[in-house]
Image (cartoon, rainbow, N blue to C red):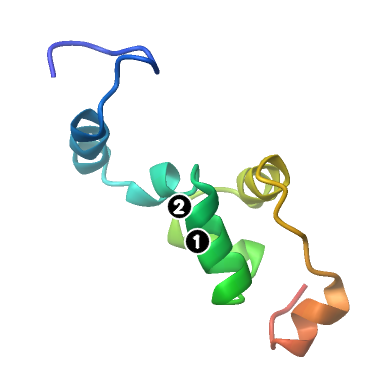
Amino acid sequence: MAGLLSDTEATSADVDEIRDIIGLPGLFEAKTKEFLTQKYISEGLSFKQIADEISSSLSFVWDALKRFEIPIRSRSEGQKKGHKS
């Protein structure tokens, strides 16, 4: 990759290359609704578990869930699944 690309110029190959270079694939994956739906809804992971997996902050995960309009579990729902709030 010769230089930095704008969002409109980046291809999936460019993203894969950047992913490999910085070693944080989770940050890119977390920007997709499918990834977050899989982790949060299907697998039932907590904000902290997702944040740890993608080497990010809880606020990043919260913001991404809100941005993609993924329903946030209540504390009691999370605790029923065995997760600490």
Tell me, yes or no, if residue 23 can be seen here.
Answer: yes
Q: Is residue 73 above or below residue 26?
A: below
Residue found at x 69% / y 88%: 82
Secondary element at image label 1: helix
Q: What residue does disc 2 label?
A: 55
Q: Is residue 75 above or below residue 57?
A: below
Point out the image quarter for the C terminus: bottom right
22 to the left or right of 26 = left
Residue 62: x and y, percent? 70, 49
Determine whether label 1 and label 2 are within 8 Å by CB: yes
Q: Is residue 18 above or below residue 23?
A: above
Residue 33: x and y, percent? 55, 50
Marking on residue 40: none
Give the camera-side residue of 56 and 71: 71
Q: Is residue 9 above or below residue 64?
A: above
Amino acid type at circle 1 is Asp
Q: What residue does disc 1 label?
A: 52
Graded by Cα atoms within 10 Å as few (under 14), some (14 to 19) or many (20 or more), the crowding at tag 1 reads few
Secondary element at image label 2: loop
Query: Quadrant of residue 2 in the image?
Result: top left
Residue found at x 50% / y 61%: 52
Tell me, yes or no, if residue 51 can be seen here.
Answer: no
Number of numbered discs visible in the structure rendering: 2
Residue found at x 81% / y 79%: 77
Query: Quadrant of residue 78 in the image?
Result: bottom right
